Amino acid sequence: MNLYERIALGEKGEKLFLLGNEAIARGIIEADAQIVTTYPGTPSSEIGNTLAVTSRLYDKPYYFEFSVNEKVAFEVAASAAAAGYRSATFMKHVGLNVASDALMTSAYIGVTSGFVVITCDDPNCWSSQNEQDNRFYAYLANLPLLEPSNPQEAKDMTKEAFSISEKLEVPVLVRSTTRVSHTRGVVFLGGIENIPTKKFVKNPTRFVPVPAVARGRHKILLKKMSEAKELSEKSIFNFVESNKENIYGVVACGAAYSYTLEALKNLDVEIPVLKLGMTHPLPERKIVDFLKNKDKVVIVEELEPILETQIRAIAQRNKLGTEIVGKNEGFFPRVSELNVVYVLNGLSAALNLGKEIDLAKMRESMEEVRSIVPNRPPVLCPGCPHMGSYHIIKRLLPPKTIWSSDIGCYSLGMNEPFKMADILYCMGSSIGAASGIAKTGSKAVAFIGDSTFWHAGLPELVNAVYNKHDVLVVVLDNLTTAMTGHQVNPGTGKTARGETTKVLTPEFIAEALGIPFVTVDPYEINRSIKLVKELLKRKGEGPALIVFRQKCALIRPVSKIFEVTDKCTGCQICINSLGCPALTLKNGRVFILGNLCRGCSLCAQVCPFDAIKEVRKRVKG
């Protein structure tokens, strides 16, 4: 069996070497969830990629979908759970912002079968526009929260979250982080449950939260959180690592717990560690027992000092003299990821152990390495159609144009040689931002990808039409959700389970809204320029739309290869116009790296000396 088959069909006791995200997928399977939804986003993407495949491997499969955005994904799964089917939804941290409206209300009306919401946070912004700490959502919505520290816990906590949800009849949050989601480790599989489904029982006084209903449901939610507190006290995920008596102690959660254990080992000290896996509501009695007879306790957590603040309050409320320290005293940073060195130094400083690692020397050695290794900033892939799209628009519009960007591969348009990204907020914001800029009298262009267009671009486009915003909307349609792993979207004609469905296009929307539009191939520069020029001559108020459509270079078969001939003068116009990674310099002349060339022909089209020619065919799937 391949890995997907083993994740889907593996039996209890079997060991697999899984990513944290693959382990979460297995936890969903073991819990016998019947309805699972997502909108893909790193660092959560592998959960969906796994479940999309494994959902097809059963005689009676669970239902899985890539929804158009996280709010829709949440509503589909939450409603299924309210109707009696175990359900789950998952997303990256900023995706929960999109779903937060539904999240807050779902806490009030609750569910009748287990409903688990997995949020994958991204400390250090490895693939995100911020590094918000989504544990705050558990406090804001009054919902239970679990935090795994490794792939085994990622599976086990996900499975347990369904049971907690059913006991309390509320959604349960599971917070992973990049280092948990993308760490691979040995995972012991559990058995796959067989949970009977239920029927939806109409009850408007519960499921329709008009103000009179909502007031009553809020009281019920608070009572359920009191019950959740007792579950937290008994949770196997909250435990003390060492019972050795010591005047010092450490409380840690998530990936920070793993760093803590390694740091203490390197410090060669044995200090009791209270490991918290269910971090909301906190097990107050267990924490009080841990704090007693300790002079100082250090709190180790990633991003915000949430546990630190809560545990300090617990100590005060219970009249304990224990000193609680962590981020607020500067022992650990509130930005970026923690690591073993940060934790080791923080613990050493907090507990006066005198064994800090010299970070200045570490940085010096890193700078030495950086001086040797070439800088490799993120770039568009060789042959990426977005290079052609940017090149064409840049040739047609003046430099003073303000470029409104969006979330996707094309965010890299901010870099050389294009420099065509001036403002960016979140998914779908390009059209709204361009609209605001247009109202200041500046020329504004909104760049938005196909998946992002379906995710959040529709309301903004409608608003632009309704309010007569003079913006040019450029849809970069590469026929996939490329940045997060080539998942399907409404423009691909396929569902997550491989079923054929209707192909939707931005042109349908433009036509329905009465927006002038043109569809072009970014690989055909001259023809595209001619067609776009005609569109730009339009008269009237409101937006216009250009669709640049060409398959992502990574999924388009390579059928030809280009090389540079002796006609090359070394002018570097091709490099400076496109920034293609397949183009490089060799002895003062341009050279094409054949193993990278995707045969797009863009460089041949921009060369003023006709020095780049197709030299051979190549077919690669």
Image (spheres, rainbow, N blue to C red):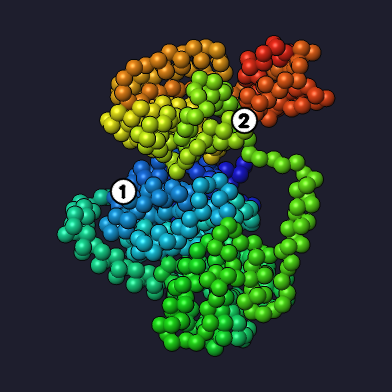
Residue at 46 percent across and 72 percent down: it is: 309
- Residue for badge 1: 79
Which residue is at the front of the view, 197 or 458? 458
Packing grade of label 1 (10 A; few <14, some 14-19, many >=20) is: many
Looking at the image, residue 296 lies above or below residue 135: below
Picture quadrant of residue 592: top right
Across and down, in percent, residue 241 comes to 60, 75
For marks 1 and 2, give the CA distance.
47 Å
State which tag comes first along the sequence, 1 or 2: 1
Left or right: residue 386 compared with residue 505: right
Q: What amino acid is at disc 1?
A: Ser
Q: Is residue 8 visible?
A: no
Q: Helix or strand or loop: what does disc 2 sit on?
A: loop
Q: Residue 272 got which mark? A: none
Q: What amino acid is at disc 2?
A: Pro
Looking at the image, residue 261 lies above or below residue 596: below
Looking at the image, residue 203 lies above or below residue 424: below
- Residue for badge 2: 417
Across and down, in percent, residue 434 comes to 40, 34
Left or right: residue 110 compared with residue 406: left
Q: Is residue 241 visible?
A: yes
Across and down, in percent, residue 485 comes to 55, 38
Left or right: residue 165 compared with residue 175: left
